[in-house]
Image (cartoon, rainbow, N blue to C red):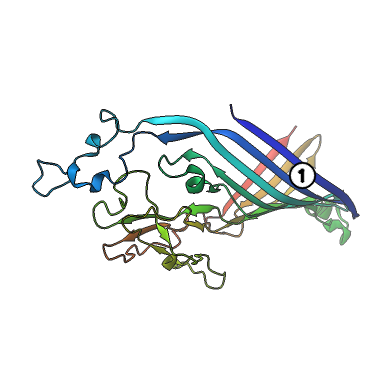
Amino acid sequence: MQKTYNFSIEVQQSVGFSTIVTAAYVANRQRNLLTTQDQNLVPVGARFDPKNADPTSAAGATLPDAFLRPIPQFTGVTERTRDGYINYDSFQLTANKRLSNGFLFGTAYTLGKTMGMTGTLTSVLDPVERNYGYAGSDRRHILSYNWAWNLPNGSAMWDHAITRAALDGWQFAGVGFWRSGTSSMVGFSTTDANGTDTMGGGDPVRVTQVDGCDPSLSRGDRTAERFFDTSCFARTPRGSWGSNQPIVRQPGNKNLDLSISKTFQISKTRLQVRADAYNALRVSNRTVNTGAQFDPAGNQVNSDFGRLNLPTDEARQIELSLKWIF
C-alpha cells in the first residue's frame, strides 16, 4: 500500500509594513510506489554466444530473441512490485504584505530537491544503484510572485466629475514565476544496427558519461546551439552498461501575466472593464535535445544534440472583457 509522510517546521515573523515573512523546511517521503520489472529478459551475453547462431542464416545471424528468453513462449513478463520511493526536501521562504495604502503583494522562493526510484526497474543490475536519482519533476529553484495595486486616483490632480469617473478606481495586478529546469536523462542511438546492444542481453544500456566531465555550462558559455557540453558523452563500448545517471538540466522557464481593471458604478448596477495580458513579456520557453547518435567509430553525428528546440509558446495573448453586475 502506497504511503506518504509529510513533515515541516516553520518560523514566522512580522517585519512591519503589514508584511509577514515565513521560513520553513518542508519535506515528504513517498513509499511503496508501484514499480515494474521484466522477468523475461534475454540473458546477458546470449546474443553474442556462437551457439545461439541461427542455423538457417547464411550470414550467421543470432536466433530471434523469442528463442533466447527464459520463457520462450512470452516476450516480456512484467512483475509489479512496490519498491518505488521518492524523497523531497526543500527550504521555503515567503513574504506576504496585506493590503495597505492600496497595495498588496506576495512572493515565495523554494530551494528544493526531489530524488527517487520509480517506473520500470532493472532486473539484472542493482535497481537502487541504476535507477535512484533526480526525479523528472525535480526543480532546484522556484520563485513566484503576485501583486495588486490600487492606482492613485486621477481626480487628485483635477477634481471633476469626468476625471472621477474615468481616472479613479483603477487596479493594476500581476502574477509571475521563474523556475529552473528539470533533470533529463541523455539517451543514445547508433547509425549501425544493434549498436546499443553492448551486453548481448539484459537490462537496457545507457550512454557513457566521461569520467570527471560535467556537462553543465556557465550562463555565459551557454548558447542556443550548445546548451550543455556534448563532449561529456560517448558511445558505450561493448561489454559496458554505460553510466548509471547521465543527467543534464533542461532550460528553466518563466512567465508574467498582467491585468488592469476598473469598475464603473451605473445607477444600481456596476460595469467592470478589464484587460489581461498573458505572457506579457513574450518569453519563449524551450527544451534541449538530449538524444545523442554515434557512428561505428564513436563520432557523435546528431547535429541537434545539445541544441535548444524551437519555442512553442512565445505568443503574447491579450484579452479584453466587460462584466455587467446587476
Q: Please name whichever residue, 225 or 132, is drawn nearer the observer in this view of the structure.
A: 132
- Image coordinates for residue 101, horizontal then vertical, percent: 88, 53
Q: Residue at x 32, y 50 (%)?
A: 199
**Toward which corner of the image does residue 186 lie, by quadrant?**
bottom left
Q: Residue at x 78, y 48 (%)?
A: 24
Q: Please name whichever residue, 189 or 298, is drawn nearer the observer in this view of the structure.
A: 298
Q: Residues within 10 Å of mark 1 (few under 14, many from 20)?
A: some
178 relative position to 245: left or right: right
36 relative position to 239: left or right: right
Q: Is residue 244 above or below residue 229?
A: above
The answer to whether residue 146 is seen in the rendering is no
Q: Residue furthest right?
A: 16
Q: Residue at x 81, y 34 (%)?
A: 268
Task: Check the picture and name the quadrant holding the C terminus.
Answer: top right
Q: Residue furthest bottom?
A: 220
**Would you name the residue on which mark 1 appears?**
263
- Image coordinates for residue 132, horizontal then vertical, percent: 53, 46
Which amino acid, by three-letter code, is at mark 1?
Thr
**Toward which corner of the image does residue 73 lie, by quadrant?**
top left
Task: Check the picture and name the quadrant holding the N terminus.
Answer: top right
102 relative position to 288: left or right: right
Q: Residue at x 43, y 58 (%)?
A: 289
